[in-house]
Amino acid sequence: MAKSAKDGDDDFTVPFRDIDLNGEMHRAAYIIHAEDALARFWLRRGSVAGDPAFRVSKVGCTIHSPLKLGQVVNRDVRVSKIGGRSAGFSVLFTVGDHLAAEAEIVWTSISPDSGDTVPLSEELRDWLYQYLD
């Protein structure tokens, strides 16, 4: 099993701004919170010369039980796939021991200069493999 992508707790409390008229978290808020968790995950790598830039090529979310105002939610980022020119990430939203939602984000690697797709370096692939689920 891959090691956890957490470097400590990554909890948030569902804020009022994210609640709809039904008292549930807005669907778009799941993606915002998932992207925030992925940005925190990526900070673990730090800036490495020669790394590509990335473009989001796919985003999706499965909601198992809607989150509600004031719930404390933990986010855990996992690498779900490593392709030649892309990497996929799963962000798991849990409340206690209950899986509430799963977001999927796929990044395609691009040249920072031209914007053309480029292969992931072996060094980057090796770093990602430690978090492969």
Image (tube, grey):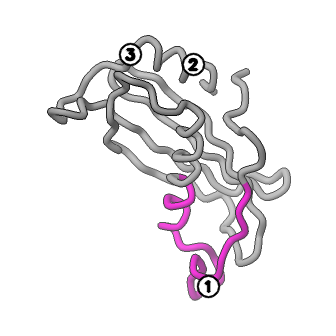
| Coordinates of residue 23 in the picture (x, y in percent) | 65, 83
Q: Secondary structure at mark 1?
A: loop
Q: Residue at x 54, y 54 (%)?
A: 36
Residue carrying label 2 = 129
| Coordinates of residue 33 in the picture (x, y in percent) | 56, 59
* Quarter of the rendering containing residue 50: top left
* Quarter of the rendering containing residue 115: top left
Q: Which mark is residue 22?
A: 1
| Coordinates of residue 102 in the picture (x, y in percent) | 60, 49
Residue 117 is left or right of residue 51, and the answer is left
- Which label lies toward us, 2 or 3? 3
* Cα–Cα span, label 2 and label 3: 12 Å
Q: Earlier in the sequence, mark 1 or mark 2?
A: 1
Q: What amino acid type is highlighted by mark number 2? A: Tyr
Q: Say few, some or many: other residues with alpha carbon within 10 Å of mark 2 (under 14 / 14 to 19 / 20 or more).
A: some
Q: Tags 3 and 1 in contact by the CB under 8 Å rule?
A: no
Residue carrying label 3 = 121
| Coordinates of residue 40 in the picture (x, y in percent) | 58, 46
Q: Earlier in the sequence, mark 3 or mark 1?
A: 1
Quadrant housing the C terminus: top right
Give the farthest residue toward the right. 96
Residue 119 is left or right of residue 30, and the answer is left
Q: Nearer the viewer, residue 62 or 126?
A: 126
Does the magenta segment cover residue 52?
no
Above or below, 11 against 44 in this view is below
Q: Say few, some or many: other residues with alpha carbon within 10 Å of mark 1 (under 14 / 14 to 19 / 20 or more).
A: few
Q: What amino acid type is highlighted by mark number 1? A: Asn
- Which label lies toward us, 3 or 1? 3
* Quarter of the rendering containing residue 117: top left
Q: Earlier in the sequence, mark 2 or mark 3?
A: 3
Does the magenta segment cover residue 26?
yes
